[in-house]
Image (cartoon, rainbow, N blue to C red):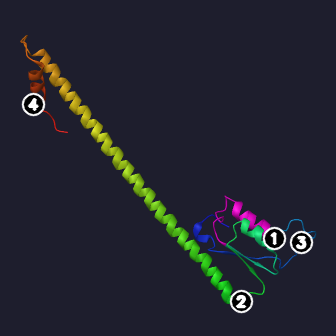
Amino acid sequence: LNNNENDLPDLILIMSDFLTSENDLSTSSAQMTSIDLCNFIRNNEEIKINSIPIIVILDHEDKQKELQFFNLGVGDVIHIPYDILDLFARIELQLERVIEKKKLLDSLEGLMQEQKTRNKKNIDFRTKLVSKHKETIAFYEEKIKFYKTNIYGKYISFDIFLSLVFNKNSPGL
């Protein structure tokens, strides 16, 4: 399988126990059981198929094996004999879940992008605000420095000094 998302299947259907008996693997030690295959699919990060829904078809009812499949993240297990309409309904249900999951992920991605935009705007606003405050402080520092050096030795009250500083040409916040 390629890692190209367009080449990946929408659903994996595994027909277990048909060609070889999973209980008797002595004929070939290289064979993979359906449980091994599900484990490989769910735990292999290199091939991006670990989130694709899986339906397993078993030739007999085995609750222990079903539990193993469900613990591996299989979406559904069907037993032979099965009704073809039932199989189609289960496939449709799994595909609907994929669509809903994609919608939720897209929505979440959109919300995350909105939050990033808000955070950037917030940072930009705060940066501008800090810059404006620095300009205002620098303006008043210069004004105070000017009045301190240009009082010409006259005594003025602190109230008059402040009114001189804050009433003429002060920048707005």
How much space separates mark 1 and mark 4, taking CA atoms?
Answer: 86 Å
Q: Which residue is mark 4?
A: 167
Residue visible at 65% across and 74% down?
A: 11
- Between residues 83 and 36, which one lies in front from this camera angle? 83
**Looking at numbered disc 4 in the image, what kind of residue is underneath it?**
Asn
Q: Residues within 10 Å of mark 4 (few under 14, many from 20)?
A: few
Q: Residues within 10 Å of mark 2 (few under 14, many from 20)?
A: few
- Quadrant of the rendering where the C terminus is positioned: top left
Callout 1: SS: helix
**Looking at numbered disc 3 in the image, what kind of residue is underneath it?**
Asn
Q: Which residue is mark 1?
A: 64
Residue visible at 10% across and 26% down?
A: 163
Q: Which residues are magenta?
A: 33-53
Farthest top residue in view:
153
Q: Residues within 10 Å of mark 3 (few under 14, many from 20)?
A: few
Q: Which residue is mark 2?
A: 83
- Quadrant of the rendering where the N terminus is positioned: bottom right
How much space separates mark 1 and mark 2, taking CA atoms?
Answer: 23 Å
Is 93 on the left or on the right of 32, as rendered? Answer: left
Callout 1 touching callout 3 (CB < 8 Å): no
